[in-house]
Image (tube, rainbow, N blue to C red):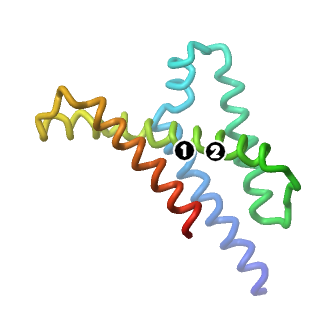
Amino acid sequence: MNILLLVIVGFASGTIVGSGIVALITLLDIVPRLAQLTKTYSKIRTYENAIILGATFGSIASITDFSVKANSVFTVIIGFYMGIFVGLLAAAIAEVVNVIPIIVRRNKIEGYVIYVLFALIAGKIIGTYVSLFFF
């Protein structure tokens, strides 16, 4: 009986989290925006399939003992693509909320926007390296 309850709670929790992620990706218009920026409107179905397959295989890998024996080059390539995804998601959230224009107007730094962007990028990179090498 306890195992059945755990299965039901786990399935319900996964469904809720998955629905939230799908709602976030839909709300932020990530796929259409990516197609617009890259001028690849004909590839929207491919982007959607890649997101679905990535989420499915990621979920399977999380709940099983799945592992890949890979060399460092492969690991760096996968990490690079994961970073691109996180960057796209963060940029989409920032674009929807319009954080950067609000900060620029409030602080009256219109001529220094490029420096603000570089500071954000540098902070992200430095934070990643500190986390990677020290924690």
Specify the label residue 34 is tagged with: none
Give the amino acid at mark 1. Val
* Residue marked by disc 2: 82
Q: Quadrant of residue 85?
A: top right
The one nearer the camera, 60 or 126, is 126
Give the amino acid at mark 2. Met
Residue at the spot 53% in from the left edge and 52% down from the top edge: 20
Query: Could you tell me if the residues under marks 2 and 1 are in contact, i.e. CB atoms within 8 Å?
Result: yes
Q: CA distance from mark 2 to mark 1?
A: 6 Å
The one nearer the camera, 1 or 102, is 102
Q: Quadrant of residue 61?
A: bottom right
Specify the label residue 86 is tagged with: 1
SS class of the residue under badge 1? helix
Quarter of the picture containing the C terminus is bottom right
Quarter of the picture containing the N terminus is bottom right
The one nearer the camera, 130 or 93, is 130
Residue at the spot 66% in from the left edge and 39% down from the top edge: 81
Q: Position of residue 22 (x, y in %)?
A: 57, 44
Q: Position of residue 96 (x, y in %)?
A: 36, 36
